[in-house]
Amino acid sequence: MLNLQACLTLKKLAKESRFWRAILEEANKPKRRRRVVNVHKLNRYTKDDDVVFVPGKLLGFGNMDHPVTVSAFAFSKSAYEKVTRAGGNVFSIEDFMKLYPKGRGVKIIG
């Protein structure tokens, strides 16, 4: 689960945005039911400079050939490296909430 401050911020944003409401629903699920997404899926369903949120864990299977901005509940070390090596940005959920408080233009992949 998220830390207390992030959880409170997420609940506040969920009142104003359908995007964050969907993320809050996913955050409240047990860990074993959370989504797992590989980098190759992220690469397949995104274009250059897309903004993406993964409501689960991003794993490093596959390759990234274009830059994306991504946030997730958790990242594997190899996934983090592959996204940054492709020129993308990786944000913690706290930073992502500050950058995209309305969730406009953000894709949910998973």
Image: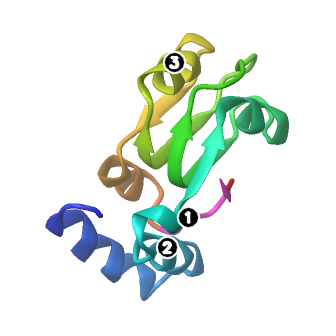
* Image-based side of 23 in relation to 5, left or right: right
Q: Quick one: which residue is furthest to the left in this view?
A: 4
Is residue 104 in the magenta section? yes
Foreground disc of the pair 1, 3: 3
Q: Residues within 10 Å of mark 2 (few under 14, many from 20)?
A: many
Q: CB under 8 Å between callouts 2 and 3?
A: no
Numbered tag placed on residue 103 in the rendering? 1
Q: Which residues are magenta?
A: 102-108
Under mark 3, the amino acid is: Thr
Residue 28 in picture, x, y percent from top left: 40, 77
Dot placed on the residue nearer the N-terminal end, 2 or 1: 2
| Crowd rating for badge 3 (residues with CA inside 10 Å; few <14, some 14–19, many 20+) | some
Q: Amino acid at mark 2?
A: Trp
- The coloring applied to the image is rainbow
Q: Amino acid at mark 1?
A: Gly
Could you say whether the residue bearing mark 2 is in a helix, strand or loop?
Answer: helix
Residue, disc 3:
84
Q: Residue at x 64, y 44 (%)?
A: 37
Looking at the image, is mark 2 or mark 3 earlier in the sequence?
A: 2
23 and 48: which is toward the camera: 23
Q: Is residue 90 magenta?
A: no
Distance between mark 1 and mark 3 Cα atoms: 22 Å
Residue at horizontal 76 percent and vertical 38 percent from the top = 41
**What residue lies at 44% left-to-right and 31% top-to-bottom?**
76
Query: Residue 56 bears which disc, if any?
Result: none
Residue 84 position, x and y percent, is 51, 18
